[in-house]
Amino acid sequence: MTLETSRFESPTDVEGAVALLAAEGGAKVLSGGTDLLVQMRLGAGAPQVFVDVKRIPRLMAVRLGSEGLTIGASVPAAEIFENESIRSLWPGVAEATDLIGSTQVQGRATWSGNLCNASPAADSVPALMACGAVAVIAGPSGERRVSVDAFIKGPGKTVLRRGELVVEFEIPAPPPRSADAYLRLIPRTEMDIAVVGAGVQVELDDGGAIASARVVLGAVAPTALFVEAAASALIGSRLEDAALDAAAAASRAAATPIDDRRGTIAYRKKIAGVLTTRAAKIAFERAQAR
């Protein structure tokens, strides 16, 4: 299929988008297009139908309330990062969003594209997982909610069925004494793929110790992964050295990276531990400030 033979559709409601995706086996969602265009240039060819979803109001909406954030799947990364409320309530998610490509790319790129591309090194995915984000999916059978941690099944593979698309994300409101952070290491200073990414969310008790925690690693396994042992090591502590050392060791043990041009297995496992402790410290300090 070439661009000359492809069809372009721009529905204005979710039902219209679902109908197009269900009817056309070669249809592809065009939201930001930053991954789809790259895939085309790498030889995948043009889809039979481009389904542009940016004219659907629900997919472009941002709603912030007492229960948390609901954000449309086509809201660009630049708009998300520029939202002061999002940066204040979920600074780690905002940090990860700001790392998606260049400034120009962020004007088009979306969380849904970053998620549906299903790259092990996607920056937004560990941060969204750390905050308990859920993807709302619409399809021929109606709507369903899938937690971000269950959405990706492997590199390039997701839970989406024919006719389905992500319409929005839900992030629960953070508890009063909680905060998140996201860090990554890349070979260059900017616009590169993560060697390792780490998202951490912590909640403090009335005494200032960590009451609950989430630690998520990216780029060190086929999918982003929760490191339960690292989170357990942090709980009950005020990030004393012993707790940080145990969390780092747990992250190193959980990481199952590959050797590639971005780093060796040994190097990436070590960095997984380093970023876990650094992100934990940032999240802890932010939670204390609240």
Image: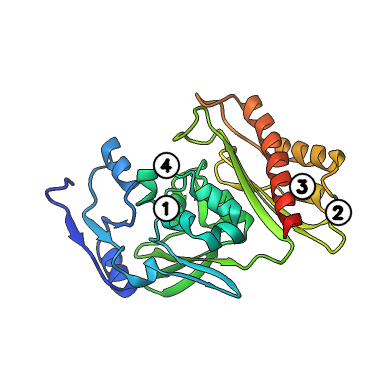
Q: Indicate left or right for 277 with 225 as reference.
A: right
Neighbours of disc 1 within 10 Å: few (<14), some (14-19), many (20+): many
Which of 252 and 62 lies nearest the eye of the viewer?
62
Pointer 3 local density, CA inside 10 Å: few below 14, some 14–19, many at least 20: some
Residue 39 versus residue 129 in the image, above or below: above
Percent x, y of residue 60:
37, 66
Q: How many marks?
A: 4
Give the residue type at disc 1. Answer: Ala
Could you tell me residue 42's position as x and y percent?
Answer: 30, 36
Looking at the image, residue 246 lies above or below residue 216: above
233 or 275: nearer the eye? 275
Could you say whether the residue bearing mark 1 is in a helix, strand or loop?
helix
Residue 236 shows which numbered tag? 2
Do tag 3 and tag 2 residues touch (Cβ < 8 Å)?
Answer: no
Cα separation between marks 1 and 4: 11 Å
Query: CA separation, marks 2 and 4?
Result: 37 Å
Q: Callout 2 environment at 10 Å: few (<14), some (14 to 19), or many (20+)? A: some
Q: Amino acid at mark 3?
A: Ala
Tell me whether circle 2 and circle 4 mark residues in contact (CB < 8 Å).
Answer: no
In the image, which disc is placed on residue 78? 1
Residue at 47% of width from left, 52% of height from top? 115
| Pointer 4 residue | 101
- Residue 272 percent coordinates (x, y): 66, 36
